[in-house]
Image (cartoon, grey):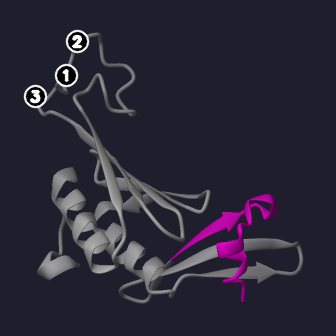
Amino acid sequence: MIDGMEHLPTTEAAVTALRALADRYGREIEVTHDIGADQTSRRTAAGVGVTTDADGSLPHEAHVEFGGLPRVRVRLFPEDDALIDVEGVECPDIPRDDVPAFLRSLFDGLAYVKARRFPPGYFLVVPLPGDRTHKEFIPMIVLTPWLSARVR
């Protein structure tokens, strides 16, 4: 992880790690925060004016957008996972601790697009530490120039 961080216990810790990544790769970063049960996306059942969860905690969700190519947006949820959007391809349920490694693979050029002949299809493949990969189906209509340049 970043500077020895192996675990990102909070949304704010993940945002700090993403700011360090943006600095390392010379990318602009824009961060917005949604704090409170009435503001976060997965708490739609929260009543009006209810800001804490039943256990008294204050949920925190962050939206992070990186400048440059590939276009990357990250949505960090309070439940220790994230949704990463790479050039319009949504990669859901990424563990919060894997988000920095996922982005390093993208920014270092390790991620690629795997083409399948029959039935025709494309998959975004992002290598992660520990001989793991994340694969996500790409509809052919979403194949952007950045994604097309990485087809194998």
Separation of residues labelled 2 and 3 (CA atoms)? 14 Å
Identified at 62% across, 73% down, the residue is 124
- Sequence-wise, which precedes: disc 2 or disc 3? 2
* Badge nearest the viewer, 3 or 1: 1
Mark 3 lies on residue: 56
Q: The N terminus lies in which quarter of the figure? A: bottom left
Q: Which mark is residue 49?
A: 2
Amino acid type indicated by mark 2: Gly
Q: Which comes sooner in the sequence, label 3 or label 1?
A: 1
Name the residue that disc number 1 marks.
Answer: 51
* Residue range corresponding to the magenta coloring: 134-152
Give left or right: position of 74 versus 14.
Answer: right
Query: Residue 48, how many percent across, how many down?
Result: 28, 10
Residue closest to the far left: 56
Labels 3 and 1 touching (C-beta < 8 A) = no
Where on the picture, by quarter, is residue 13? bottom left
Q: Residues within 10 Å of mark 1 (few under 14, many from 20)?
A: some
Q: Do the residues labelled 1 and 2 touch (CB within 8 Å)?
A: yes
